[in-house]
Amino acid sequence: MKCPVCQAENSHLATVCIACGSFIQRRVENLDLFSCSWKILERPAAGFRMVALARHKNYAIVLSAISGFALIFGWFWMVKGGDHAVNLINVLAAGIALGPAVGILATLAASAGITLAGRVFGLHVRLRDAYAVAAYGTVPLILTSLLFLPIEIMSFGIYFFASSPSPYLMRPFSYLTLLGLDGVFALWSLILLIVGTRVLFGAGWGKPMAAVTAGLVLCGLMVAALSGVVLHRL
């Protein structure tokens, strides 16, 4: 982006010219949680641009913390954490206690991977911008923990996280429907993260997808390490 005053080249997300200090585009001071989240769901590119331009990344930590519930319970389902637990209370207590920390650390890991990948590609990406984009990209994941997780727990109890008996054998249609919805919303979050990274990079789709892959690898390793410790204590 060129400064209209001095014609100096600036980042596409810069609000002040690095050469003369003139304002080159409107700066967003604060983010409203609900309007910003809705804009990201409705018009992702415009919503993430607003997040990147915001001076204060309001609610980013709150969103990342809440998303941790979907991450930790999703991991318990993948590794069949119910097989290692004495009862459902232990699984719920572990998920509720660790969810916020897992969400914050996972978002930090993902945003660090995106930031590092951007540096490799020769792009200047700030960690706080990447963190805010990753946090707001988890809105669909948060919806799964609010809408579907309670139904899964009420329908299957601890057996939703166990292999014996399989929850599929108990209620096959309900189980597959809930898993399908979880998968769709997880894919939605992934697509939003790629779109948000593309906004940060100001590039095509290849580099953002590679950066998101790097971020998700770091995120997955971190969640797996934390959850592995928890499973031994259930």
Image (cartoon, helix red, strand yellow):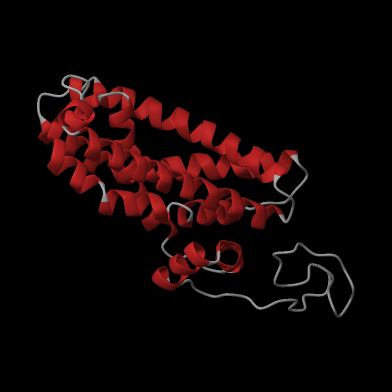
151 shown above or below 59: above
Q: Residue furthest right?
A: 7
Residue nearest the observer in this picture, 63 or 156:
156
The count of marks equals 0
Q: Is residue 8 left or right of residue 149?
A: right
How far across and how far down the image is residue 35, in percent?
Answer: 44, 73
Q: Is residue 35 left or right of residue 193?
A: left
Residue nearest the observer in this picture, 170 or 120:
170
How far across and how far down the image is residue 191, in percent?
Answer: 54, 49
Quadrant assignment for the C terminus: top left
Quadrant assignment for the N terminus: bottom right
Asked which quadrant contains residue 114, the reply is top right
90 shown above or below 11: above
Q: Is residue 58 left or right of residue 44?
A: left
Q: Residue at x 62, y 51 (%)?
A: 197
Residue nearest the observer in this picture, 19 or 82:
82
Can residue 118 be seen here? The reply is yes
Asked which quadrant contains residue 196, the reply is bottom right
Can residue 66 be seen here? The reply is no
Q: Is residue 129 left or right of residue 88?
A: right
